[in-house]
Image: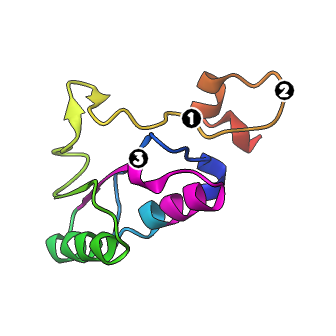
Amino acid sequence: MAQMLEPQAGESIYDPSCGTGGMLISCLAEVKRRGGDTRTIRLYGQELISITAAIARMNLALHGVSDFQIASGNTLAAPAFAEGDRLRSRPRAAISSRRPGLTRSARAAGAWTR
């Protein structure tokens, strides 16, 4: 999943159901693999189960991540990173595709699975 997202240095990455933070750490590793500066990545996540959110915080800290925010709570009922109907953290809205002619909005709508 992290390779499909193609995270870049300087971006914000948001996982609305982050669990123990595995995908966030994978995105960080992907940026590092591509030679990017991982210190410029901002990681955000929300997890319904408070103890799991605490484990995600610990996991990110143990991996040396300093710029992260993990919230506890129901993402659908009370999104922690929303302002109105938009995400506050401004993560990448699309999954990259190498197919020509596929627009960013089409990728965001899931057209990449065709």
Residue topped by disc 3: 40
Q: If you read the primary sequence from the N terminus, does the residue marked by circle 1 or circle 2 appear first?
A: 1
Q: Is residue 10 magenta?
A: no
Residue topped by disc 1: 94
Q: State which region is magenta.
A: 26-47
- Say which residue appears at 75% left-offset and 25% top-offset: 102
Q: Residue 50 carries which label?
A: none
Label 3 amino acid? Answer: Thr
Q: How far is mark 1 from mark 3, CA to CA?
A: 20 Å
Q: x%, y% of residue 44?
A: 31, 51
Element class at badge 1:
loop
Within the image, what quadrant is residue 46 found in? bottom left
Q: If you read the primary sequence from the N terminus, does the residue marked by circle 1 or circle 3 appear first?
A: 3
Q: How far is mark 3 from mark 2, CA to CA?
A: 30 Å
Q: x%, y% of residue 45?
A: 30, 55
Name the quarter where the N terminus is drawn.
Answer: bottom right
Element class at badge 2:
loop
